[in-house]
Image: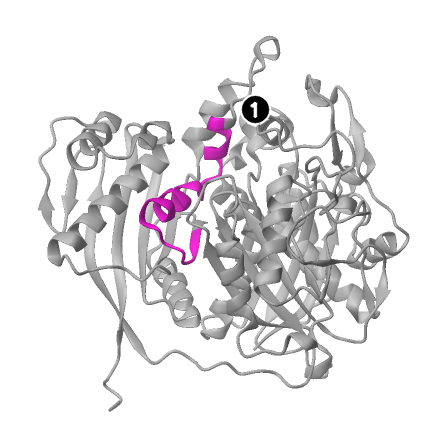
Amino acid sequence: MVYKIADNIISPIGMTTAENLQALKAGVSALCLHEGKWGMPEPFTASLFSDTQQSAFLKPGMSRFASLVTTSVTKALETADFDWKGDDVILIISTTKGNVEGMQGLTGNDAEVSLADSANAVARALEFKNSPVTVCNACISGVSAIALAYRLLQSGLYRYAVVCGADVLNTFVVSGFQSLKAMSVGSCRPFDMERTGLNLGEAAATMVLSTQPTEAANPDDCWRIEAVAVRNDAFHLSTPSKNAEGAYRTLKKVLEGRNIEDLALVNVHGTATMFNDQMESVAVERAGLSQIPANALKGFYGHTLGAAGVLETVINMAALDEGLILPTRGFDELGVSGKINIAASASHSEKKAFVKMISGFGGGNAAIWADKKADWVQMPLCKPFLLEKTHHVHITPQEVVLDGATLEVMEQGKQMLTELYKGRVSDYPKFYKMDMLSRLGFLAAELLRQAERTESESVIPNDERAVILFNHHASIDADRNYLKSIADPQDFFPSPSVFVYTLPNIVTGEIAIRHHYHGETALYVLDGKNQKLMEAILNATMEQDCITSAVTGWLDYEDEAHFEADMYVVCRKTNTSDGE
């Protein structure tokens, strides 16, 4: 099992977890209307750090983002008694846009624009020995990061995992959500009949996880992560499935073998957008959780993006330690069709277990089960297995190689990708709307699928096939294109169709939608093409989630002259060497 041994939350309502909990108990919210902020033409409501608060966490020579992460991690580690500089510790950072403001020439260190560079800056400052991993899976990033930590620890690869979710706001992020018409001018109202959209927020939250409780602690008094799941809707990039397929599958997975009567609450995502809240209510009802109290915390914090999953997990742990179910600020009258028991006011519970669920762009959904009760449930482990690479594709600006055979192409660079589409796919016009990273990944996955069909017409992947990809530059090409739409204050016209592709995990959603894969989708940003780390993450994920097959590998697009898809299909083969 995996124990939480330390934590921290830094937000506009508090610089520690305890301060945040006291603020929530007092009904404090930092959401307020900002007009003319950063020269933006439209007002917006958000939870932002004050100048005084920022001065408390800014580090010399570091960006706002890296400073915030470093401060939160430091505060958490101050209460954890172990050597975090050892080789048995992994640093995992979850974020959506990191230090993207460095690209805009705003405050921040331009050298940390890359998510990998920001993560390295934090790792260097705190003297972590191992290379960090950045989880960039849109809004589910925080829970996805906890899931990754859980799997790496359960697999015995590390003894400790330091998970920090963080995001800061800027014109890039706010204008993008405004372009999607997703934001409410007033304070958000999750699940309410009068909800009109989301608010955004800044925050960082850290969980230190371990395979063992602290020496002074009774194991039964420690919060534990006992189950994790990530699944994709395979429906739409920015609109959740109407029948909540991905969210339902994650809930079904984490509830497996467990008694829902043990749950004090379900912490839902609760963005206060029309479609998200409706979808979550359907998922909760389908999973049999309609009678369990459900709370959403966006009315206090706003949507804190990559921090949300970690922050909301930590604060609900702290609240339940005091027997408190936190309320859903802004909720008055139910405005969704699914049966869900929204906690409109604070209440008491002696139970010490809850489910955290979350969803996001790219069709991603994630959930975890956390508790601190004595009767821990040991789920059956997968049978021993070996991974087999069945097909492999390698695409560079100069050539395409599929299963060792070089494909004939006339063009090079991004024109070659268009040639590949026209000559080998041609039936998916949405291809031309994709950013270049997604086009590259889409084509690589398409060639792999075609190779499977050629091998045997009867080859039909399990619909829970995973898509697990790694890169270094995240969505930098799409980021540059989006910046063009907001660079000139006199011609400020943010494009929603471009903005959605500034979330690098969108490529995994494109692949899932095309091939109807409902399995886990994830994109991890690394310092480089670290094959050992990539294989460790893949193996741990497939082992802990009993995944039977995955599309995986390296997928990076810096510009039209520098890109690479080194992707393959892996299938799990049962290891019968033990005599089974």
Q: How is the image coloured?
A: one colour
Confirm whether residue 312 shows in the render. Answer: yes
Q: Using a 10 Å C-alpha cutoff, classify the residue at mark 1 as few (fewer than 14 neighbours), some (14 to 19) or many (20 or more).
A: some
For residue 235, above or below residue 343:
above
Q: Which amino acid does label 1 sit on?
A: Gln
Q: Where is residue 306 in the image (x, y as percent from the top left)?
A: 60, 47
**Residue extending furthest top?**
490
Confirm whether residue 94 shows in the render. Answer: no
Quadrant location of the C terminus in the rendered image: bottom left
Q: Where is residue 336 in the image (x, y as percent from the top left)?
A: 67, 48
Q: In this view, does 273 lie to the left or right of 149?
A: right
* Number of numbered tags placed on the structure image: 1
Q: Where is residue 197 in the image (x, y as percent from the top left)?
A: 68, 36
Q: Position of residue 106 (x, y in %)?
A: 62, 25
Q: Is residue 506 part of the magenta span, yes or no?
A: yes
The residue at which mark 1 appears reads as 104
Determine the secondary structure under disc 1. helix
The residues colored magenta run: 497-522
For residue 134, above or below residue 384:
above
**Residue extending furthest bottom?**
579
- Overall secondary structure of the magenta stretch? helix
Q: Which of 247 and 442 is in front in this view?
A: 247
Q: In this view, does 482 lie to the left or right of 283?
A: left
**Residue at image point 31% right, 52% down:** 553
Q: Is residue 579 part of the magenta span, yes or no?
A: no
Quadrant location of the N terminus in the rendered image: bottom right
For residue 492, above or below residue 86:
above
Q: Which of 335 and 12 is in front in this view?
A: 335
**Residue at image point 12% right, 57% down:** 455
Q: Nearer the viewer, residue 227 or 557?
A: 227
Q: In which quarter of the image is residue 272?
A: top right
